[in-house]
Amino acid sequence: MAGWRDRLREVSAERGLDDGQAEQLTTLLELIARDEHVPTAVRDPAEAVDVHVADSLAGLEVAALHDATSIADLGSGAGFPGLPLAIARPAAHVVLVESATRKADFLRRAADAIGVANVEVVHARAEEWGATTDAAVARALDALPVLAEYAAPLLRVGGVLVAWKGRRDPDEEQQAAAAAAQLGLESAEVVPVQPYPASRDRHLHVMVKRSPTPAGFPRAPGRARKRPLR
């Protein structure tokens, strides 16, 4: 048990987190380990400290996300990357958007257990949530063209979408660029990251909102996934 705590302190130090923030991350990992309803298969803290926490905090390498005052985690699931980002950036308002009731319930329990005052859980589909945010993040949610359509209507002009992805796929990236052009977005950069020593082929895809999203978006719930923009 001491091993993962040492590793968590390393990760926290790498990201400039203080002892209080490291303790909040410890509480999150302990909750995941004991809550039988947690919506993730990775529950052992020895694995989750890297696979969940270190991977989530890698998003801070994107300057626009690091400096955002409002962040929406789309399809938040078990709260990654949203909860670690909320802990790391207490001045930012972080909204965890989740359509599944069981997952949204877990997110509320987790936010209460950790004691993060800057987190809001929204039980809704991304297409139905009508707020505006500086940044949208998504991890293990969908293909890039679909994520672009989810995020574009929610972002202010100048805001960013940051998508966690594995090995680069030229076809997916080409389709994403085409979708982005229809949505007022621009594929800005792909940032290679290595959040923990054993990680391979991890990338953060960054899209910037350059102009207002045209009328007609978001399309009806489910449409983006069934008929992605080309």
Image: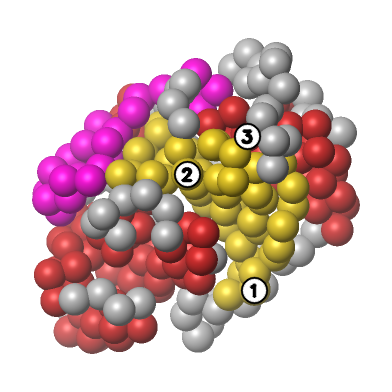
Q: Distance between the residues labelled 1 and 3?
A: 23 Å
Q: What amino acid does circle 3 point to?
A: Ala
Q: How far apart are marks 2 and 3 (CA)?
A: 11 Å
| 93 versus 189 height, above or below | above
Residue holding disc 2: 134
Kind of residue indicated by mark 2: Asp
Closest to the camera, between mark 1 and mark 3, is: 3
Q: Which of marks 2 and 1 is in front?
A: 2
119 or 123: nearer the eye? 119
- Would you place residue 116 above or below residue 50 in this image? above
Mark 3: secondary structure? helix
Q: How far apart are marks 2 and 1 (CA)?
A: 22 Å
Q: At x 17% / y 50%, what residue is drawn?
A: 116
**Quadrant where the C terminus lies?**
top right
Span highlighted in magenta in the image: 105-128
Answer yes or no: is residue 173 visible: yes
Residue at 59% from the left image edge and 53% from the top image edge: 163
Residue 123 forms part of the magenta stretch? yes
**Quarter of the view holding residue 34:** bottom left
Residue 190 lies left or right of residue 137; in this view the side is: right
Give neighbour class at mark 1: few <14, some 14-19, many 20+ (Cα, 10 Å). Answer: some
**Residue 205: x percent and y percent?**
66, 58
The location of residue 146, given as percent across then percent down, is 69, 36
**Residue 43, visible in the rendered structure:** no
Which structural element holds mark 1? strand
Which residue: 35% across, 58% down?
85
Q: How crowded is mark 3: few (under 14 residues within 10 Å), some or many (20 or more)?
A: many
In the rendered image, residue 85 lying in the magenta stretch gets the answer no
Badge 1 or badge 3: first in the primary sequence: 3
**Image spot of residue 164 (x, y percent):** 58, 57
* Residue of label 1: 192
Check whether the beta carbons of the residues at disc 2 and disc 3 lie within 8 A of each other.
Answer: no
